[in-house]
Structure formats: C-alpha cells, structure tokens
Amino acid sequence: MQPYYIARNEDLDLAYNENGFACAELLPGTYDGGIRNFKCRLKAGCDANPALYADSTVLFIFGFGTGYIYDAEACYNIRELSFYAPNFDKCPYTIHAVTDMEYVMSVVENNEWDKQVIEAGHVYLPYFQTYSQMNRYVQDCKGPNTEARSYLRAEQLGRIIVGTTRAIGEGTREKGHPSVHQWNYCVGNSDFSLSVDHCEPVPHKAGEWSFIPAGPDHDLVADPGKEVFYVWYEHFAREKDFQINPLPGQKLPE
C-alpha cells in the first residue's frame, strides 16, 4: 500500500449530464473498509436528488459554491463550507445550486457492529452544520495560529469523525495514528504541501482530495503567506480501536 494517494482535479472525468450534474468516484480501489467517496458538481439553477440508503451512512461536504438543501425538516442555506448527514432513507432531500457548486458525497457501508452502535445512540438526523457553527478545539500537533474545528466526534455517527484545519503559513505536523484512516478535502484557497511518512512534500491545492492510510506520520503545512484549509475525514480501522467497552453480549474482534 502506498503512503498516500491524491485525486487531482485534472484527473477526474466530471462530464455534466442533461440535468447539470457531474459525478466521479474519488480514488476508487484504495480503501477496502466500506467507504466510497464521490466528487460532485452541480450547475447553477439545477437540482440533485441523491439516492437514499437504509443501512449506509451518507455524508456531504459542500466545499465550493452556494445553494441550499431542503427536506421535510427544514431548508439549510449553503453559503460557506457546510456539512450534511441525511436521516438514512427516512427523509428524502434535494440539493439546489444557486451558483455552480462542488461537493463530496461519502457513502459509508455499516456492518452489523456499526448498526448496533448507531441504534444505541447517534447525533440527531438530518444533521446540517456550517463551518462558522462548528466548535473550535486545540491540538498539540497544530501550529499556534492554526484553527481547528469539529463537525462529528467519535460515536456521534458510528466510526467516522470529521473536522477542519485552517491556517496561513503553518498547519499540521502529526504523528501517525494507526487506529484511523484519513481523507483530506482541500477547500478555500488551499495551496500547501503534503508529506507522508517523511516522503518528499508534494503540492496540494483547492479542490483536491487525498487519502492517508492508517499509520504513517503526516504533515499538511503551508508556506508563509499561503493557506492550508482542509476537511479531515477519518474512519476507525477496527471496532476494538473505536470502543473500549463493547455493547451487552458483544465480543469485539481481535
């Protein structure tokens, strides 16, 4: 397995259909843990009605453009980086683009263990939050002027956790985490360097997507005057790493 993978915009086949919608899978075949990610684009004035999933968690990361989502619960305005997790197949929803939009849709296949954990408790769905609404947190691997925010914490929606990192001229220098795999979606005016397992740094720019398998050290750092702004999206590799105390009658895998 490679230390990292990057999906650059020029490598994706994003041809629009007659409804003004384009979609391409991001880094297919690089992760066998039940998660598939898709880069989507929607032209201004067009709608998208995503498929509903009964047993899979779906997560949207709205990186560029403006629009709104409406479902039976509410209408959610997208004017900045935003996140949306629908209520499985219980509540249909529509995405409408006011300006040209780009977003990532992630489909997480839940195994029986995941389903039990989600049934026991999860964040209220549908769950929409903008970047400005997210709680800030502090982490010692980030520079002193690097801002970190959280959208999903552990056990709020199964084994996925999601947040953001943003800075000018600094970023993250993190020791490897063997328990979680990590994807990164570059947003804003991102123009920074990615280095994994002490490999030569490579450029990482706005709109790009990367995958760092669990384990190696990794740096995501911008040069002076340049921006690092990415959504980090992590999935616990094994159930036993995610939850120390099993559910009643449950035996975690070795």
Image (spheres, rainbow, N blue to C red):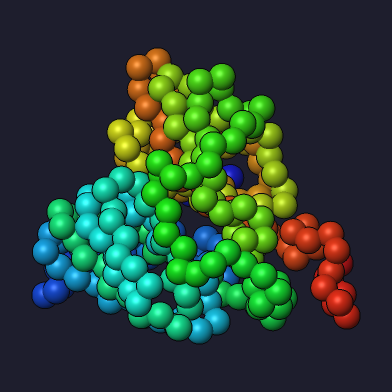
Residue 95, position as x, y percentages in the image? 26, 67
Q: 21 and 125: which one is in front?
A: 125
Residue 126, position as x, y percentages in the image? 45, 69
Residue 76 sits in which quadrant?
Answer: bottom left
Residue 249, position as x, y percentages in the image? 88, 80
Quadrant containing the C terminus is bottom right
In the displayed structure, 55 sits above or below 101; it is below
Q: Residue placed at 68% from the left, 34% from the top?
A: 175
Q: How many marks?
A: 0
Name the outermost residue toward the front: 73
In the displayed structure, 222 sits above or below 165; it is above
Residue 214 visible (yes or no) = yes
In the displayed structure, 35 sits above or below 61; it is below
Q: Residue placed at 52% from the left, 60% from the top?
A: 30
Quadrant containing the N terminus is bottom right
Q: Residue placed at 30% from the left, 65% from the top?
A: 75
Q: 125 and 169: which one is in front?
A: 125
Residue 200 visible (yes or no) = no
Q: 114 and 123: which one is in front?
A: 123
User: In screen coordinates, is 107 left or right of 39?
Assistant: right
Q: Residue placed at 59% from the left, 35% from the top?
A: 137
